[in-house]
Image: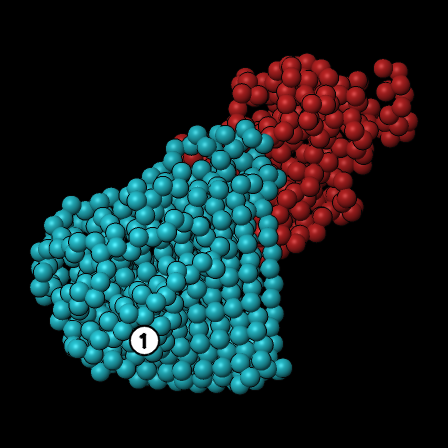
Chain colours: A red, B cyan
Amino acid sequence: MLEVKNLHASVAGKPILNGLNLAIPAGEVHAVMGPNGSGKSTLTNVLAGKPGYEVTDGEVTFNGQNLLDLEVEDRAHAGLFLAFQYPTEIPGVSNMEFLKAAIDSQRKAQGEPAISAMDFMQQARAIAKRLDLNPEFLKRGVNEGFSGGEKKRNEILQLLMLNPKLAILDETDSGLDIDALQVVSDGVNAFRAPDHSVLLVTHYQRILNYVKPDRVHVLARGQILRSGDASLAQELEARGYGWITDAA
Amino acid sequence: MTEAREDLEKLVKREYSAGFVTDIETDTLPPGLSEDVVRFISAKKGEPEWLTEWRLKAYRHWLTQPHPNWAHVHFPQIDYNAISYYSAPKSQADGPKSLDEVDPELLRTYEKLGIPLHEQALLAGVKPDPDLPVETAAGNLGGQVAVDAVFDSVSIGTTFKAKLAEAGVIFCSISEAVKDYPELVKKYLGSVVPFTDNFYATLNSAVFSDGSFVYIPKGVRCPMELSTYFRINAQNTGQFERTLIIAEEGSYVSYLEGCTAPMRDENQLHAAVVELVALKDAQIKYSTVQNWYPGDENGKGGIFNFVTKRGACIGANSKISWTQVETGSAITWKYPSVVLRGENAVGEFYSVALTNNYQQADTGTKMIHLGRNTRSTIVSKGISAGHSENAYRGLVRFSPSAANARNYTQCDSLLIGDRCGAHTFPYIESGNASAMVEHEATTSKVSDEQLFLCQQRGIDAEKAISMIVNGFCKDVFRELPMEFAVEAGKLLEVSLEGAVG
């Protein structure tokens, strides 16, 4: 589904990613872990196409398409979703209005008609319930006055409503209490399917107790230094990052 | 970040959709202003002598007035002798007796603008139930709107006159009102905005050509929305309309005003006066969607919109509410105000003013509290994009007689891009220690993070901006009548095109 080859990227002229390689097949969940400042957020932002991140070398293909050639919204239309680490507020624009605009933009890009208000509301209510969110939540302004946990659950609500092919979660687990972590993990697990992939970027092993990864990668100094199965995460939890980063 | 902006700049720029010119024979006075011109206009309208004299007094006063320069707007001096002060479609020299007599070309103009001048045409397709009594029906009449259309200097037709007459409501052009209801006009014309009020209002008093007149009798709730559409068509003409609305005791009226003009390279002057009079327990709701041609993206052409709008809450418990959405005009200079004379009177001002490209707006309101327990609310949302300058200027005055008066002001500015300006000039004068005033102001920017969030979810930048701006304006849009709220939302979208450039 996603193939990243020799990716180099810099922010404000400063190189952050230095030849990163990563391949995520369809149906798999890959965790990317790493210490602070290793380039985790840069990776997610480069994949989503955030302005200000400059790709200096390498290539990224997404379901056979050259991802780096696509505009931000076209990447979304192609099925790439980014759950933000710090979801931003849009005052006065209701969650509902925002979600419907997003769904309709994506349907329009696929040549489909807009979703009917009734179908939309049914889906949104069902998903909100699953995420333990009061339906009133849909009427509030996007992330406006939401608690940290609500913002993260709102990201998962958007994920499940938009139903993309690849979900990139940028430290979605950070700052969540154990109950919220459980709810968010359930949401991610509900998204798992043979034609869906997940790139789960995290600092801690904790969420991997709930969302079982197929592969775990260690990102440091802008490169994947080591990859392994789920047991690698446990090893990191026990030993820290030093034994990998120092050896490299 | 520049990438997204450049892309946006490349996006197709829809043209100002109301910018066409109607090819029609007109009766136009040569440019220039003199007592003869004032007399000509008055004679053309067959006005009584008192009105001719009133105009002349205004004209003589105007000659003594310096051009005001306190507003935060800049433009070259206007040559008032280069403007023609009267233009009327020729075929209507004697005025249309009914809509059937209106030049079909004119009707097509209004069709292009989406304004139905045929009475059977309903805006929202909701047919009112004829069996319902007037009071009850009013609430259900969402779809029916009576329209007075003003083309250049004259009113070309008013719809639903007969139906309104049944309720005792008078809705006609001010020229007709001068002929048919002279005592009402004489009593109220200039009672809220005297001819000495300010430079442009004085000019208007001298040369006003037409406009709308509304009279709601005692205890009547006007059975439908009333609406005037103003259209400037002719070249080198000024438009000086005068609107007068009188709501007798216990009456209610909701009035909508829309404006468009063709795209022309030279600036055109629009100096209107609107006077509202609310007697005891009466309510007037006045909504404007102003879409005058704003000039092109380099700031060439566009309307100079120098307008005086004021309402007087004369009676106790009366209420006047201004709601405006301003996206047009090269320069806007406008302060819809309320004089709160009656006890417990309420004044409201809800405004969205959007400027893009090289537009300049200096707009706001005045709430003059004279009576006890009077209350006013001001909610102003200014949006600046491109190279534009957007200023809010508001005065809240509590006179010594205004015991326990209250004002709440909320004044928010939103900036799009980094080449525009937002300014706030609040004036608060309190002559009564028991008066209370609250003032809140914010300035924010459409952030790159907000844009990125929307785009990441698949929403393109242009749609994202319009959504963010609409969210910002929600408090004001809520106050607009349904048809206008939809129109206003669309208008913002069009006006913002290329705004992120």
Where in the figure is residue B7, as x and y percent of width and height? 48, 29
Judge whether B274 appears above or below A227 on screen: below
At x 71%, y 48%, the residue is A149
At x 27%, y 58%, the residue is B239
Q: Please identify the quarter of the rendering in which residue A184 is found.
A: top right
Name the quarter where the N terminus of chain A is drawn: top right
Specify the farthest residue to the front. Answer: B64
Name the quarter where the C terminus of chain A is drawn: top right
Q: Nearer the viewer, residue B143 or A134?
A: B143
Q: Nearer the viewer, residue A110 or A26?
A: A110
Is residue A63 visible in the rendered image? The answer is: no
Which SS class for mark 1? loop
Is residue A234 visible in the rendered image? The answer is: yes
Task: Write down the residue under mark 1.
Answer: B190
Q: Amino acid type of disc 1? A: Gly
Describe residue B420's horizontal placement relative to residue B242 as left or right. Answer: right
Where in the figure is residue A168, as x and y percent of width and height? 65, 31
Q: Please identify the quarter of the rendering in which residue B195 is found.
A: bottom left
Describe residue B343's horizontal placement relative to residue B13 as left or right. Answer: right
Where in the figure is residue B220, as x and y percent of width and height? 30, 80
Where in the figure is residue B55, as x and y percent of width and height? 24, 71
- Tag 1: Cα neighbours inside 10 Å, few (<14), some, or many (≥20)? some
Describe residue A203's horizontal placement relative to residue B152 as left or right. Answer: right
Q: Please identify the quarter of the rendering in which residue A115 is found.
A: top left
At x 50%, y 30%, the residue is B6
